[in-house]
Amino acid sequence: MRDWRRRGATVIELITTACIVFIVLAIVGGGCCGFHGMKASDGYRVGQIQKASANGIVFTTNEIEVTTSGHKAGMQGGMTNVFEASCPDDELFAEIQGLDVTKTYKFYYHQERLVAPWRGGTGYIIWKVEEVKPDEAEE
């Protein structure tokens, strides 16, 4: 058994260790880049804007919360659900911040399998918002 405290690692051992670390990081990083931007689902949520804020210390991201009405099994009466999403588009985020909180909107999103930290804190990325007209809500 080698006593690592008495002698330093040889140059070959250092190069071998560095190569192994590099290969592992390349595999993990490549896998992350491969999943980045890969859509898991598309859709929309209908609700009212509850919160729009820019969060973060290292990466500042635009995060929103939308209250949606819903019903869970076993619960009586209506209840409010909160849909959390990110909005990497600064122009769209400025539009969302100006929305009337008393009106109902459709928030179109796509869900990504892996989100880069600078794109948002959630897997849901908002890409479009449109107002729901009162006659559309009744259908």
Image: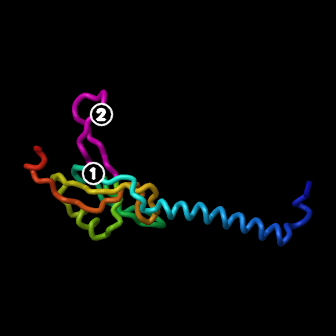
Quadrant in which the C terminus is drawn: top left
Q: Foreground residue, 16 or 50?
A: 16
Alpha-carbon span between mark 2 and mark 1: 17 Å
Amino acid under label 2? Lys
Marks 2 and 1 in Cβ contact (< 8 Å): no
**Residue drawn at the location 92% of the way across and 62% of the way down:** 6
Q: Foreground residue, 75 or 42?
A: 42
Mark 1, residue position: 66
Q: Give the residues in magenta.
A: 66-84
**Picture quarter containing residue 18?**
bottom right
**Residue drawn at the location 31% of the way across and 69% of the way down:** 90
Q: Foreground residue, 73 or 113?
A: 113
Q: How is the image coloured?
A: rainbow
Disc 2, SS: loop
> Is 130 placed left or right of 43 in the picture?
left
The circle drawn on residue 72 is 2
Amino acid under label 1? Val
Residue 75 within the magenta-colored segment of the rendering: yes
Please provide percent x and percent y for residue 16: 77, 67
| Above or below 102: residue 19 | below
Q: Residue furthest bottom?
A: 11
Please provide percent x and percent y for residue 101: 19, 54
Quadrant in which the N terminus is drawn: bottom right
**Residue drawn at the location 72% of the way across and 68% of the way down:** 19
